[in-house]
Image (spheres, rainbow, N blue to C red):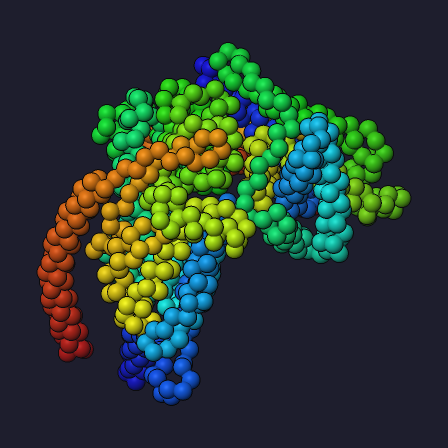
Amino acid sequence: MQAKLSVVALSVAAAFALAACGQKEEPKPVAAPAAPAAPVAKPEVVVKLGHAAPMTGPQAHLGKDNENGAALAIEELNAKGLEIGGAKVKFELLAEDDQADPKQGSIVAQKLVDAKVNGVIGHLNSGTTIPASKLYADAGIPQISGSATNPKYTQQGFKTAFRVMANDVQQGKALGEFAAKQGVKTVAVVDDRTAYGQGLADEFKKAAEAAGLKVVASEFTNDKATDFKAILTKIKSKKAELVFFGGMDAQGGPMAKQMKELGIKAKFLGGDGVCTPEFMKLGGEAAEGNYCSLPGMPLEKLAKGPEFKDKFVKKFGTEIQLYAPYVYDAVMVMADSMKRADSVDPAKYLPAIGQTKYDGVTAMIEFDEFGDLKGGAISVYQYKGGKLEYVETLGGGAVATAQAEVKEAVAEVKDAAKAVAGAAADAGKEAVKAGAEAVKSAAEATKAAVEKK
Amino acid sequence: MDIFLQQIINGLVQGSIYALVALGYTMVYGIMGLINFAHGEVVMIGTLVTITVAGTMIKAGMPVVLAGFAGLSASVLVCMALGWGLERIAYRPLRNAPRLTPLITAIGMSIVLQNLAMMIWGRNYMTFPPLLPKMDFEVAGANFTAVQLIIVLVSSLTMGGLLLLVYRTKLGMAMRATSQNPAVASLMGVNINRVIAAAFVIGSALGALAGVMVGTYYEIAHYQMGFMLGLKAFTAAVLGGIGNLAGAMLGGVLLGIIEALGAGYIGDLTGGFLGSHYQDIFAFIVLIIVLMFKPSGLFGEKTGDRA
């Protein structure tokens, strides 16, 4: 019996040891550049960049747009022929479909981790980006998202998580203040219950209430719905003067249209998810005259914007939907960091990402200590004559205060965690003591029983 | 009060769409006992074909009425061919296989059709050309459009037509005979293959019609639009008693109205604890209650293992 037990114990120990080994091995250098052995032929290193976005489902058009942005950047990088660590670098895109579904997002994230990618661009949605970011952080793989705007993404304390777009605290705040300036008094808020939609709607609600607006209705839908008449009817009965939608264009377009059909005269306002040509196509006349916002500045107003647009349209034969320029910048920032660190090893070039100062298409990209874009501006647009017309750019000052708030919150959380840890340690010590005593007394009882016999 | 009326109208229109799709499910189930999960995709292809044909014709400067009819006929024809092909390729070889096998094939066909549509029409949303004149009406504070009226009319007329077909024609008699006992029916000189193929072709034509209605109503289309719609329509068919035509109609309308009322009132009823995104819970609770007391659905007949 004892022999058997020890075998079991041994195998358990071995399993633990193995598991521990496995964990240790994961963050090891991935495609470490080969040592320059022969100076004659320069070695070539393949750098694998993972990309994840929905390529199927209602947001497939946005997913393809993101992938095109990444593909364009990689094509240009390869044409340039970068040299990193003395080796010629060839970038390769590993594109995955996460179906905008948090479950699928984690599956493809694991797939990318297993493929030992050097970095990840994406995901598109906040709902997929947040759970996936943990997997990348555990594996030590840097991740830059060009479109996940939920503040939580960078607030989890992962050193590997970055984004090249303003977050929803900034956007919701700007939109709430913008709504107050429109001369309305009552607003209805609708969101699609995704991490992005809900997060943006909550931030908007806070800002709107702070600006003295009254939120008369909070309604919900989902990111696959096409019929909104029931919730819109309810909003109509509450006499809202403005309807804010936190969600994507595929829902926003029909929603604006159905508002009109129901005779609702309220204005429609939305965030970056509905600031697309697709929204206007789907919303038709109902989109006309309404407003939406996009992080950053309009492409036309940026130095490299028009040039990027021409390149994109020429290569893919379609208009830019939404995030392609941001994804393009994300790839460029990653490549730039590798070049500055002179290494494609995630562990080595990760610190370089934090020190990025890259003049991208969308902005001058610099990160704060959380991995958020520094000084991200928010621009408001109006749908006019089937086009998005630039209205104004908000933000800047608001950003600083938001960051200060976040810092405070993080400090609080840290204190709380310390307290919890301390308490847990004490509790643990006591438990161990109690357990040892229990074992001792049990042994004594056994001994006594044996002696009795 | 006007809100209640408006919610009933919302539900009635949505329900009529469910009903129109549910008729296609129930038609095939009534005869073969097969749940054709690819039916939602037939609806989707009906919508997309109409967009392509009518959209091109309108762009070429033809009158909207003509383009609309051409689009409708084209989509009905394509879907009929599709329905026939589905039966011939995916279901007929499996007719004597265990009942689970054709069900899985149906799910497989649904995925194949979705991806095929994605390859042909792309991933982007498409806008449906406005085929019907835009007219708004207002009655007692409730708004509705001409399109909504037409949808309710078309689905009621279609159901009436189907009932006539099944109970007043020779083909209908053959269908009923096949549904009761295919082996005996074939001994009586009924060509089973032809009857089943006819059921698929008619069901798919209805699917095309439903597709055009959905397209005109929401004015958008997408290669995955058929999935959710098919699921809801299937639920409606089960609610009404699958295999029963009047049941499909009633189930569809009921489901639509329950959903609309659920979304409209669930928040107030639960004091804000459950939001409007729980509207489906409402619909499915009703479904579960109905099935608990009447497992064959509202209008369904009691059947043995074989439907």
Report the residue at 34% width, 78% height from top.
Answer: A86
Q: Is residue A296 above or below residue A37?
A: above
Report the residue at 27% width, 31% height from top.
Answer: A177
The percent position of residue A218, horizontal first and vertical second, equals: 35, 30
Report the residue at 24% width, 65% height from top.
Answer: A351
**Between A315 and B214, the one nearer to me in the picture:** A315
**Between B189 and A389, the one nearer to me in the picture:** A389
Residue found at the far right of this picture: B189
Q: State left or right for residue B288 relative to residue B57.
A: left
- From where the camera sits, is residue A196 visible? no
Q: State left or right for residue B259 relative to residue A420.
A: right
The percent position of residue A175, horizontal first and vertical second, equals: 31, 34
Q: Is residue B129 above or below residue A45?
A: above
Give the mark count. 0
Q: State left or right for residue B26 relative to residue A163.
A: right
Q: State left or right for residue A423 relative to residue B29.
A: left
**Between B47 and A79, the one nearer to me in the picture:** A79
Hey, which quadrant is residue A238 in on the image? top left
Report the residue at 73% width, 45% height from top.
Answer: B83
The percent position of residue A405, horizontal first and vertical second, equals: 17, 44
**Between A445 and A387, the one nearer to me in the picture:** A387
Q: Is residue A414 above or below residue B225?
A: below
The percent position of residue A60, horizontal first and vertical second, equals: 50, 49
The quarter of the rendered structure image containing the N terminus of chain A is: bottom left
The quarter of the rendered structure image containing the C terminus of chain A is: bottom left
- From where the camera sits, is residue B216 visible? yes
Hey, which quadrant is residue A156 in on the image? bottom left
